[in-house]
Image (spheres, helix red, strand yellow):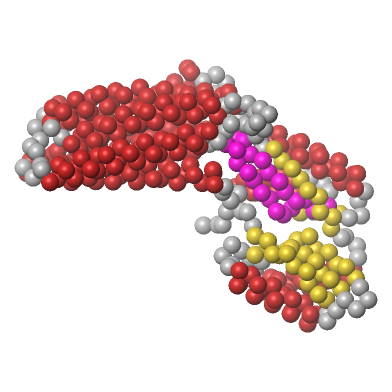
């Protein structure tokens, strides 16, 4: 069914990097979500009304909120596809995240409303009328939600959409809540123990947790995330793969919406190569890597000493000192400035994010002291830096 819908309604469905194709995927997911959730709401609410079950009606209203969420997602996807303009030079992609955040608030509101209703029903319980046909329809709705979870997850993987991943997780949460509701009805029917209000509370809490999780996932790219390790490897490998590039550091990626990222990176080039030659290489890398990885890439050149034996020897000794202190430490932008009585070793030190200010200052002083032991004339001018890359799990 998923492939049929994609092939039927998404033109050029394999070209997922294209903005129009990505928008078509989002529109398809939203329309399917609205249709399925409205149908489930109507069926479940009717069942809950007939059975006098607060848990079922809470579950039904959650489906209605999911339909509203799909409408908001539809509007968000369409607005996010608007091209860049003079006021928004990086496009409107982050609107998709804002739409997902609104959805999360709707889910939280539904959870809070029915938590209140379930608590009231716990204080004043009412009998549940059991109907096998209604119960079976409830179970079938779980199958619909399972398919929707699979549908959104599959489409989300194709276009790397946080909104679709969140919708998939929300659908799986609905499967759990409906399952809890069905279980409470069976228990009440066969044991005459009415746990409907308790089940309603559990359902409400799960719905609220789902809303919180969606909010967390969508806030992260809005606040600013570390560079994912996979993206870090892609960009650095692509840049370092060109002849004339000795290494890279200081990669920063800014996310302006799905498939809308800007990256800056420092590329080390030999200092004995004509600057115009290196500049031509850098320009070519920016054009080709930007096109290949679908990002806007800006590269800063850092010249690296290649022949001065004193500089190379000092850099090598510094490397051994830093690695001995902590293998997670690294340095770059190394320069040596000679004076009559003093030799300045100037470099940036990258410290792990686990280091607090006290630990950073301590390691800086340790490096300075150990470098002095190598040569009393050495003085370190160190700029402490931190990586923008996601820590390995």
One can see residue 157 in this view: no
Magenta segment: does it hold 263? yes
Identity of the residue drawn at 72% across and 54% down: 249
Q: Quadrant of residue 311?
A: bottom right
The part of the chain drawn in magenta is 248-269
Image x and y of residue 204, in percent: 27, 42
| Helix, strand or loop for the magenta stretch, by majority | strand
Compared with residue 352, is residue 205 higher up or lower down, i.e. above or below?
Answer: above
Q: Residue at x 70, y 53 (%)?
A: 250
Q: Residue furthest top?
A: 8
Residue nearest the viewer, comparing 262 with 239: 262
Q: Is residue 233 left or right of residue 269?
A: left
Relative vertical location of residue 118 with respect to residue 47 in this rendering, above or below? below
Q: Is residue 37 visible?
A: yes
Q: Residue at x 66, y 27 (%)?
A: 85
Q: How many marks?
A: 0
Q: Position of residue 16 (x, y in %)?
A: 57, 29
Task: Say which quadrant the N terminus sits in.
Answer: top left
Q: Is residue 351 above or below residue 15?
A: below
Does the magenta segment cover residue 291?
A: no
Residue 125: image location, x then y, percent: 10, 42
Identity of the residue drawn at 54% across and 47% down: 223
């Amino acid at each position: 069914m998923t492939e049929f819908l994609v092939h039927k309604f998404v033109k050029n469905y394999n070209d997922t990097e294209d903005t129009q194709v990505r928008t078509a995927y989002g529109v398809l997911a939203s329309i399917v979500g609205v249709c399925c959730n409205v149908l489930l709401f109507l069926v479940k609410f009717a069942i809950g009304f007939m059975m006098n079950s607060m848990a079922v009606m809470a579950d039904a209203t959650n489906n209605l909120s999911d339909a509203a969420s799909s409408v908001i997602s539809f509007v968000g996807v369409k607005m996010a596809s608007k091209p860049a303009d003079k006021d928004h030079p990086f496009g409107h992609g982050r609107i998709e995240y804002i739409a997902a955040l609104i959805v999360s608030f709707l889910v939280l509101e539904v959870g809070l409303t029915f938590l209140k209703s379930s608590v009231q029903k716990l204080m004043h319980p009412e009998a549940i009328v059991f109907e096998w046909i209604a119960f079976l329809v409830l179970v079938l709705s779980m199958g619909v939600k399972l398919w929707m979870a699979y549908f959104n997850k599959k489409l989300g993987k194709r276009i790397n959409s946080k909104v679709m991943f969140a919708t998939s997780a929300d659908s799986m949460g609905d499967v759990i809540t409906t399952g809890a509701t069905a279980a409470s009805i069976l228990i009440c029917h066969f044991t005459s123990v009415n746990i409907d209000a308790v089940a309603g509370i559990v359902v409400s809490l799960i719905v609220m947790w789902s809303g919180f999780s969606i909010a967390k996932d969508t806030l992260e790219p809005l606040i600013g995330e570390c560079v994912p390790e996979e993206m870090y490897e892609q960009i650095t490998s692509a840049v370092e793969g060109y002849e004339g590039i000795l290494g890279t550091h200081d990669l920063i990626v800014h996310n302006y919406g799905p498939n809308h990222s800007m990256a800056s990176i420092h590329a080390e080039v030999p200092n004995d190569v004509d600057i115009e030659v290196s500049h031509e290489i850098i320009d070519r890398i920016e054009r080709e890597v930007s096109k290949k990885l679908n990002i806007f890439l800006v590269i800063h050149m850092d010249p690296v000493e290649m022949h001065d034996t004193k500089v190379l020897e000092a850099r090598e000794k510094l490397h051994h000192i830093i690695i001995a202190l902590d293998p997670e430490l690294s340095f770059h932008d190394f320069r040596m400035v000679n004076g009559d009585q003093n030799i300045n070793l100037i470099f940036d030190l990258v410290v792990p994010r686990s280091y607090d200010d006290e630990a950073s200052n301590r390691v800086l002083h340790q490096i300075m002291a150990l470098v002095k032991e190598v040569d009393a004339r050495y003085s370190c001018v160190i700029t402490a830096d931190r990586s923008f890359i996601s820590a390995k799990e």
